[in-house]
Amino acid sequence: MHKTELLERYDAGERNFSEIDLSNVDLSQQNLSGATFIKAKLKHTNLEGAYLFGVNFKHSYIVDTNLANAQLCGANLWGVNFQGSVLSEANLSDAYLRGTYLLKTDLSKVNLQRANLQRAYLWGANLNHADLRDANLSGVNLDSSTLMFADLSEANCRDSSMKGANLSGVCLIGACLDRANLSHANLSLAELSEASLKHALLTDAILEQANFSSTNLTHAQLKLESLQMAKLSRTILPDASIANMPEAMSASI
């Protein structure tokens, strides 16, 4: 569908555009809030700065599309394929992203740099290799998701839930994970240097070869057997809840 036809139909009050093909259409800065695009195809579409509040993109194919600075607050993005798309500085707060596919391709990866994902629902999402540097993930639900080798440097993950998530090889340098729930998460080979995990829950988390150098684990809850496999140089551990931690090990940190 051409841009002119879409906007004319939207202005006339139509909101259901399910299974539409908007590939290669320039819709930057346009307002399509409240529209339904279930199973739509958007390849190489330009939605930069578009107003998409509450839009329903369930099971859509949104590949290599520019959504930088787009307003997707409260949008339904269940099962959307965002492969190779740009979502830097997009507002995805309160969005529903269950089962969303953001996996890196051979040539590109999803760009979510400085995106706002506050309170977004990402249960079971695939964010492997995604660029989430400086993103706001506070209060987000990433339970059972996979973020292998994703970059969350300096990201705000305060009060997030990542229960059972696969975070193997993830980069969380300088990230804030205060009060985050990481129980049963796989953090093997994760880079957490200079991160803050105050009051974080790491019960039964896999920490093998994870780097906690200069990390703040004040009041965090974790098990000794998990911690023994991690790198702990200059780690801050006052009042951390660690079962059966020997005094000799405590003194060496």
Image (cartoon, rainbow, N blue to C red):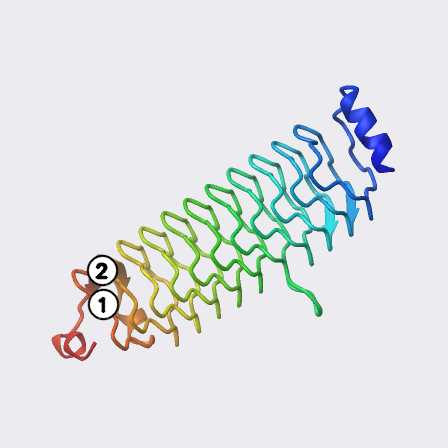
Residue at coordinates 56% horizontally, 34% vertically from top-left?
74
The correct choice, above or below, for 21 with respect to 197 in the image is above
**Amino acid type at image mark 1:** Ile
User: Which residue appears at 41% of the width and 67% of the height?
Assistant: 173
Q: Which residue is mark 2?
A: 218
Residue 155 location (% of width, % of height): 44, 57
> Which quadrant would the C terminus be assigned to in this image?
bottom left
Residue 128 spot, x, y in % from top left: 58, 62
Q: Is residue 73 left or right of residue 229?
A: right
Is residue 180 shown left or right of residue 55?
A: left
Where residue 48 is drawn, which disc sits there? Answer: none
- Circle 1 sits in a helix, a strand or a loop, which is it? loop
x 36%, y 52%: residue = 181
In front: 215, or 144? 215
Please give the name of the residue rendered at 78% of the width and 50% of the height, measured from the top-left corner: 43
Q: x, y (%) of residue 238?
A: 17, 63
Q: CA distance from mark 2 to mark 1?
A: 7 Å
Q: Is residue 195 above or below residue 252?
A: above
SS category of the residue bearing label 2: loop
> Are the residues flagged by discs 2 and 1 in contact, CB closer than 8 Å?
yes
State the residue position of label 1: 236
Amino acid under label 2? Thr
Q: With respect to residue 109, does 162 lie above or below?
A: above
